[in-house]
Image: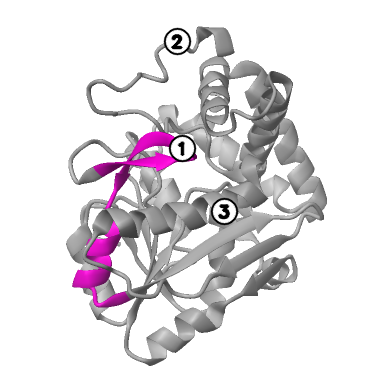
Amino acid sequence: MSGNRKPLSSYRAPRYWPVWAGMGLLRLICLLPHRVTLAIGRVFGRLAHASGGSRRAVVRRNIELCFPELTPDERDALALEHFKALGMMLVEMGLGRWARTKHLQSIMRLSGAEHVLDALAAGKGVILLSAHFTTLEISGRVLAEEFPFDAVFRKNRSEFMTELQRSGREVSADTTIEKRDIKKMVRSLRKNRAVWYAPDQSYNRKGSELIDFFGVPSMHTTATSTLARLGNAIVVPFFPRRLDDSTYELVLLPAFENFPSDDPVADTKRYIKVLEEHIGTCPEQYFWIHRKFKDLPDGYPDYYSDLDALK
């Protein structure tokens, strides 16, 4: 652990006790059979859906924008399914931290690892280009059994919550890298390593371009092209999915050819295209609770200014 990080054991003040109590409950839940664990997660999700008015409104607005062909009832049903997926994500984070590797391997099917292994064998770094799905945290353990990788993380406003997330990912990843630390990502790629990277969430206007997401203008970083070029790395899309039988499918797609090009916007559109295709297979599992369409340039709508009617 680097010198500017504090171990989890140092967060002992009373204000942290509720989180520690929740972690203790989560640890006990993770001891139950897998289907029971997910069922409890779905209950958590239903409770969050019932009580989270502002968050529920954001989810409904995102779904309304991205799936205008759905009826209002269908959009509301998808929003509820998303909250249930979020509840399952919570318990899956616990499984990713504490479950036995053998158990996780028994409920996951991984395909396409050869796309990464061949590149690493050839002396290339690999960008594991993913996105924020509710199943990401549980998928890392099985991925790490195939090859080592580093994981990018985003700081939380709370140092404690940041350390909880970061230490959880480090059960799978060799190293964690803060999302703004491009230099560290490049160094890792140049050392012939794989780096898990999810650049799909909304970014401010600096270093970003306005690119449609499901036909709606959204700010997207074009940093993947820069990383691939500076790190001399190939880009392998990686997407997980929770199946109806409570197992998981982890898919590593073939590496993008001729990437990066001389057009970072075109490169980013290629990523968005495969992302949209995967969302289509499991729409409830994408992270709709994030304000995907914020920070748009002047002249574009503020899609989150009138959420009261959707609560």
Residue displayed at 58% across by 46% down: 134
In depth, the one of 305 and 245 nearer the eye is 305
Q: Position of residue 104 (x, y in %)?
A: 68, 66
As drawn, 250 above or below 131: below
Label 3 residue SS: helix
Q: Which residue is mark 2?
A: 306
As drawn, 147 above or below 201: below
Q: Identify the amino acid type marked 1.
A: Gly
Residue 215, numbered circle: 1
Residue 270 left/right relative to 260: right
In depth, the one of 25 and 248 nearer the eye is 248
Label 1 residue SS: loop
Residue 264 left/right relative to 269: left
Residue 88 left/right relative to 210: right
Residue 224 lies in the magenta-colored region: yes
Residue 277, numbered circle: 3
Q: CA distance from mark 2 to mark 1?
A: 21 Å
Q: Which residues are magenta?
A: 209-233
Q: CA distance from mark 1 to mark 3?
A: 13 Å
Residue 123 lies in the magenta-colored region: no
Counting residues from the start of the chain, the first of labels 1 and 3 encountered is 1
Q: CA distance from mark 2 to mark 3?
A: 29 Å
